[in-house]
Image (cartoon, rainbow, N blue to C red):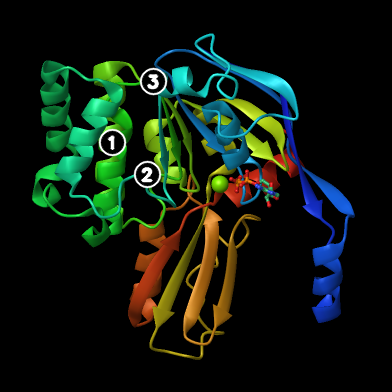
């Protein structure tokens, strides 16, 4: 079980002055401003849970994860992971956890993946049987075979992420922290990474804490989410209510051949709806609507009847949108 109690982290940042002279002044300055990256956060996570830890850029997600993994020491409050205080007992904690930072690999750049795993086997003192069993499982769910003999530096981002996941799990940790595990991946690879995360959780009962910007990650993986904003916890609970209440607005951008769009009036019957919004921009229509009431297919279909559609894209609600709406509506 993970317990986070009144956790805060402040960073002291050298005060910045503008301009070139300012840069020199800042460099020699002893004036500091403090930045509260994490502000009095508490929660508990049970064994085997998959929890989404979400919030806008700079909300304090990574800083929280770093305190939970023992990389950073809190300014206030306490973290315990299965009774261990991570930043006070880093070595013992490391045996029980796995970490993946989507932006940064933990693998040895010049080593083939195969050797990386042999090294990890020794580092974590994994028995031959356990190692073989886990390797077989990871190769299967993450498709490691196609690049198993290649050095890390030659891998694509998606391959690297799959290898990173397996490497973080090879010692069968009780808890795994995934910080933006699908960032930059294409849709197909994202899907396979999500599937693997689910299978790992089901097979080993691994507790998973996941930060992400991708609402689809959350929808598919997490039953519970914790939302933070400016370092403070603003929501902790089921994903269901949040999605229904806040995740319903969709925007479709439709590119057409015509450029005189003012006379286009296929949406008059839904224009009454105050969540519906239509704007034009050169050859583009931007349509925002409530996806619980109207489907993207309907919007695109109506447009195609009257106009020559060249291309379209669908933009789902972002985490930022949800956080903004939460402030307006209260949860
Ligand atoms: N080492 C650091 N020194 C100073 N400020 C930091 C440091 N790490 C993070 N911050 C600041 O703390 C805030 C939270 O950062 P972070 O936890 O990385 O957010 P998130 O992961 O949610 O995007 C940001 O304003 C960031 O600039
Ligand atoms: Mg981050």
Earlier residue among tags 3 and 1: 3
The disc label shown at residue 44, or none: none
Contact (CB < 8 A) between labels 2 and 1?
A: yes
Residue at the image point whose x is 74% and y is 42% from the top: 327
Q: Is residue 169 left or right of residue 131?
A: right
Label 1, ligand 2: CB separation under 8 Å = no
Circle 1 packing at 10 Å, graded few (<14), some (14-19), many (20+), is many
Earlier residue among tags 2 and 3: 3
In depth, the one of 273 and 208 nearer the eye is 208
Give the SS element for disc 1. helix
Say which residue label 3 marks: 95
Say which residue label 2 marks: 106
Q: Height in image: 137 above or below 54? A: above
Residue at the image point whose x is 34% and y is 79% from the top: 309
Task: State the image coordinates of residue 139 (x, y, percent, origin top left).
Answer: 13, 36
In depth, the one of 89 and 217 nearer the eye is 89
Give the SS element for disc 3. helix
Say which residue label 1 marks: 167
């Amino acid at each position: 079980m993970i317990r986070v109690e009144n956790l805060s982290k402040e960073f002291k940042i050298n005060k910045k002055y503008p301009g070139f002279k300012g840069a020199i002044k800042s460099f020699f300055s002893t004036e500091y401003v403090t930045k509260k990256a994490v502000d009095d956060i508490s929660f508990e996570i049970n064994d085997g849970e998959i929890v989404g830890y979400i919030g806008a850029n700079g909300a304090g997600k990574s800083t929280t994860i770093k305190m939970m993994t023992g990389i950073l020491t809190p300014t206030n409050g306490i973290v315990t992971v299965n009774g261990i205080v991570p930043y006070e007992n880093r070595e013992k904690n490391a045996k029980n956890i796995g970490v993946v930072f989507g932006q940064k690999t933990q693998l040895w750049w010049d080593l083939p993946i195969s050797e990386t795993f042999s090294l990890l086997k020794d580092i974590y003192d994994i028995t031959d049987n356990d190692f073989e069993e886990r390797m077989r499982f990871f190769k299967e769910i993450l498709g490691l075979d196609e690049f198993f003999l290649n050095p890390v530096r030659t891998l694509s981002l998606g391959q690297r992420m799959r290898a990173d996941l397996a490497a973080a799990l090879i010692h069968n940790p009780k808890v795994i922290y995934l910080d933006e595990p699908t960032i930059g991946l294409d849709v197909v690879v994202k899907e396979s990474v999500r599937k693997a995360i689910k299978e790992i959780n089901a097979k080993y009962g691994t507790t998973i804490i996941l930060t992400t910007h991708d609402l689809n990650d959350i929808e598919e993986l997490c039953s519970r989410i914790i939302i933070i904003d400016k370092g403070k916890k603003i929501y902790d609970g089921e994903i269901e209510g949040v999605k229904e209440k806040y995740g319903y607005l969709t925007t479709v951008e439709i590119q057409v051949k015509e450029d005189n769009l003012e006379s286009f009036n296929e949406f008059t019957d839904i224009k009454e709806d105050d969540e519906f919004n239509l704007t034009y921009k050169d050859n583009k229509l931007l349509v925002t609507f409530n996806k619980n009431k109207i489907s993207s297919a309907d919007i695109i279909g109506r447009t195609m009847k009257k106009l020559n559609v060249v291309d379209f894209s669908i933009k789902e609600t972002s985490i930022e949108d949800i956080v903004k709406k939460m402030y307006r509506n209260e949860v």
